[in-house]
């Protein structure tokens, strides 16, 4: 019943990306959230160091978002999006288009980041065919990339465990090398100096397959889920130039980096690199209601719509595309970002954040620290013969001491809500230092 915080049955819920046996032997749960904090059933506050899952950029329990959802649910809970529209979907698309780089102003709504990625890949293939380049079917991802869990996303992604159990995946996929270089770039502050030349691997792939077979390249501007991998100086600019040279679409997966995480609306703005499509989700609605989107260059949209030989120009969509409650949450979220200047706030806090997390360089087990915007990655030396175990122990101990962090491999990832105060940053660093000192 409402308000009942008891866990009635641990077995029924098959938890995602979780060691289920380990969790259910000693469950850690939260029952409510407000501002910078989650709260456990016994009332203990847990500082949110990861904005939920890279997504609650405005903090938790924000009244304007809650009220917008409540009001919309009372007015219209659902409207189909096939051959019918509702005003909020058009308004939300216009508001998103006002934030994206100029010309990326055609917005296709999805329900999450995985769907956004698969949508972008399908649009890329359909566009190539629409412009008479139907042989361009090859998709290029990158090693150590995460693009969600759809078959398209794990095909262009580069996380071994996400790929190895699910067969041959999409055919015609190749991968660029990742940009992580501990030997040359360890403990870089901001963008590392070395590695722009890694983008030149696209030339090798072109030489192998020919550019006339390649539809698109997709990369995360900052790879989040594989350990906060910051792009080297000049890397994204070089990749853009090579895609232009070979007439290949460039897709930025900004599911994590969008909406202020790097101190700008999108990483494309932070780096001054304009892709042909941007995928987004997470902070789009402050995670209050699931929603994703793809921002598409107008020339791609127009080529498909104006050149279509069928009434339906793109045979693709979702039952919940542009869901009224998601649009209501999204509009209220965008209003909050603007009213509180949260993107600029992230930019202003970045120097303090950088100095604070790099103060852990001498902490026990730390072999690298990476940062950009309000993102941080602290890489730990793995336990011999037990990779990931040390970081998981840090995660669990931090939670018990009132701090939630994210673990990916042996890396502690941080991405706090943009409403964070310097005192919260100090608490994050102090707790991590204590836990690392205690951890074997």
Image (spheres, rainbow, N blue to C red):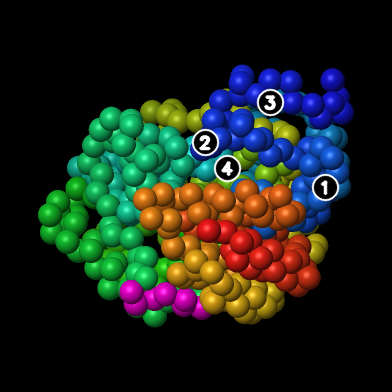
The mark lying in front, picked from 3 and 4, is 4
Inter-mark Cα distance, 1 to 2: 24 Å
Q: How many marks?
A: 4
**Quick check: 194 left or right of 55?**
left
User: Which tag, 4 or 2, sits closer to the chain's start?
Assistant: 2
Q: Quick check: marks 3 and 4 in contact, CB under 8 Å?
A: no
- Please tell me whether mark 1 sits on a helix, a strand or a loop: loop
**Quick check: 108 left or right of 38?**
left
The N terminus lies in quadrant: top right
Q: Is residue 179 magenta?
A: no
The numbered mark at residue 19 is: 2
The mark lying in front, picked from 3 and 2, is 2
Residue at 34 percent of width and 77 percent of height: 184
Which residues, given as a range, are shown in magenta? 183-189
Can you say whether 57 is above or below 356 in the image?
A: above
The numbered mark at residue 292 is: 4
What residue did someone put label 3 on? Answer: 79
> Camera-side residue: 133 or 226?
226
């Amino acid at each position: 019943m409402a308000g009942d915080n008891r866990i009635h049955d641990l077995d029924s819920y098959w938890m995602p990306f979780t060691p289920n046996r380990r969790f259910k032997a000693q469950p850690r749960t939260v029952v409510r959230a407000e501002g910078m904090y989650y709260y456990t059933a016994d009332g203990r506050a847990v500082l949110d160091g990861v904005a939920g899952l890279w997504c609650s950029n405005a903090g938790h329990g924000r009244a304007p978002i809650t009220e917008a959802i409540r009001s919309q649910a009372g007015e219209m809970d659902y409207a189909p999006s096939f051959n019918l529209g509702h005003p909020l979907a058009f308004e939300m698309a216009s508001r998103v288009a006002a934030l994206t780089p100029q010309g990326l102003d055609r917005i296709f709504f999805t329900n999450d980041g995985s769907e956004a990625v698969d949508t972008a890949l399908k649009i890329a293939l359909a566009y190539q065919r629409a412009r008479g380049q139907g042989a361009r079917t090859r998709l290029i991802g990158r090693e150590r990339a995460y693009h969600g869990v759809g078959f398209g996303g794990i095909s262009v992604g580069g996380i071994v465990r996400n790929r190895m159990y699910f067969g041959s995946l999409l055919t015609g996929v190749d991968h660029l090398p990742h940009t992580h270089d501990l030997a040359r770039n360890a403990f870089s502050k901001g963008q590392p100096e070395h590695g722009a030349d890694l983008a030149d691997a696209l030339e090798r792939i072109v030489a192998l397959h020919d550019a006339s077979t390649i539809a698109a390249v997709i990369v995360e501007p900052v790879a989040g889920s594989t350990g906060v991998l910051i792009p080297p100086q000049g890397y994204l600019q070089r990749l853009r130039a090579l895609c232009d040279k070979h007439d290949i679409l460039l897709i930025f997966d900004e599911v994590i980096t969008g909406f202020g995480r790097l101190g700008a609306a999108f990483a494309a703005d932070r780096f001054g690199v304009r892709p042909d499509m941007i995928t987004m989700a997470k902070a789009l609605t402050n995670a209050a209601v699931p929603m994703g989107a793809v921002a598409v260059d107008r020339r791609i949209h127009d080529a498909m719509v104006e050149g279509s030989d069928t009434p339906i120009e793109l045979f693709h969509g979702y039952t919940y595309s542009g869901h009224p409650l998601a649009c209501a949450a999204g509009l209220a979220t965008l209003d909050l970002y603007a009213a509180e200047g949260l993107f600029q706030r992230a930019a202003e806090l970045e120097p303090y954040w950088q100095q604070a997390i790099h103060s852990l360089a001498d902490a026990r087990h730390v072999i690298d620290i990476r940062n950009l915007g309000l993102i941080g990655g602290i890489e730990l030396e793995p336990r011999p013969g037990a990779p990931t175990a040390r970081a998981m122990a840090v995660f669990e101990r931090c939670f018990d001491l009132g701090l939630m962090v994210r673990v990916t491999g042996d890396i502690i990832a941080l991405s706090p809500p943009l409403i964070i105060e310097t005192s919260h940053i100090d608490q994050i660093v102090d707790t991590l230092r204590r836990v690392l000192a205690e951890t074997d």
